[in-house]
Amino acid sequence: MYHPQTNVGAYTAPFYRGLTDEQCRLIHCASLEILERTGVLLYYQPAIALLKKAGCLVEENRVRIPAHLVEWALRTAPSRIMMYDRSGKPVMHLGDRISTFGIGSDCLNILDHRTGERRKALLEDLVDGIRVADAMPHIDFIMSMFLPSDVPVAADVRQMEVMLTYSDKPICFVTYEWEGTAEIIEMLEVVVGGAEQLRINPTAILYLNPTTAFRHNEEALRKLIYAAEKRLPVVYLPDVQRGFTCPITYAGAMACANAGQLVGLLLAQLVNEGAPIILNAATPSTIDMKSLVLPYAEPVGKAFALEMNFYYNLPAFSTGGCSDSKLLDE
């Protein structure tokens, strides 16, 4: 008698869950209700036309999105994204609760490690930082680190030039104007051997910050549509601040933040079904209501919000290892 092989061994590792599946479902349903009843404001006509053609209710620049369109987009978006280095080698798997680590972007100031002085960042600081990050085996991807004060025009293009020159790791990049976006993507295509090669083996991720979850500005939407056409992975991060641009409760804030990123998800899939997109884990920012200071390294909401990406089975982008300290931890 034939007995099929049975796996009797198992390896398990504990992990923390901020929300249960039922809590995630409730936040998801609340986000769908926000999109369908309240809607969002879009300030880019091609994006509005695309959503209207798909069946959304449009009143000037207010768009109300039916739940079934969002559910469709969640089914079509890829649950895994593989990132490649410059030579075409797969080096960074996104999705499946796998954690990857990189450096941040666009800091205005730097603590000079030679003098201890706090000063404006320069382009040479970016060169030094990228060289260090490239040499660190546990840094999986790089970002622009500093906004160089000595580059008044097209700083994003110069940042990309430095990152391409001093590292072959995957890049997550920010652009400041639409013109820089098209130019930088063209630079990436040239470096890897053409647009088709970049599409097949993506080496970079475009990081987008719409105004808020309820207001999506023209530049962010235009960049999103362009990247989706190219099938370039995108992080879509419409920030909301608890007590300012969304409810102060975590559940209400997460529902709003999640609704905003689902707009980007839907648009990307309408432009190019299966376009790779990375959500920001529905993370709301927290403001100290007394001082009006926004702590950057507030961890609790991120632990909760990551569960929404696991619930959707989509790659997540979030901060980690951050600090609001103004002193160097030696």
Image: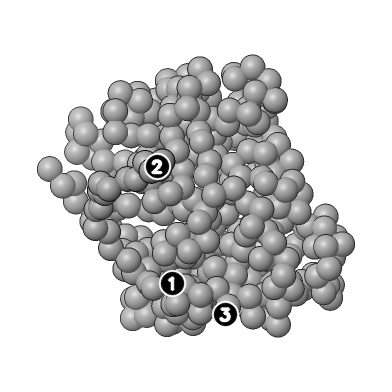
Q: Which residue is mark 2?
A: 1
Residue 211 shows up from this direction: no
Residue type indicated by callout 3 = Ala
Rendering coords of residue 197 (x, y %): 65, 23
| Front in this rendered view, residue 177 or 235 | 235
| Contact check, label 3 and label 1, Cβ < 8 Å | no
Label 3 – label 1 distance at C-alpha: 14 Å
Disc 2 secondary structure class:
loop
Q: Name the image quarter holding residue 175.
A: top right
Q: Which residue is mark 1?
A: 21
Q: Residues within 10 Å of mark 1 (few under 14, many from 20)?
A: some
| Front in this rendered view, residue 145 or 6 | 6
Rendering coords of residue 101 (x, y %): 35, 41
**Which label's residue is closer to the chain start, 3 or 1?**
1
Label 1 – label 2 distance at C-alpha: 42 Å
Residue at (45%, 38%) from the top-left corner? 93
Closer to viewer: mark 3 or mark 1: 1
Q: Residue furthest front?
A: 1
Residue type indicated by callout 1 = Asp
Q: Which residue is mark 3?
A: 30
Residue type indicated by callout 2 = Met
* Left/right of residue 310 with respect to residue 192 in the rendered view: left
The answer to whether residue 163 is above or below residue 5 is above
Residue at (49%, 50%) from the top-left corner? 315
Disc 3 secondary structure class:
helix
| Contact check, label 3 and label 2, Cβ < 8 Å | no
Quarter holding the N terminus is top left
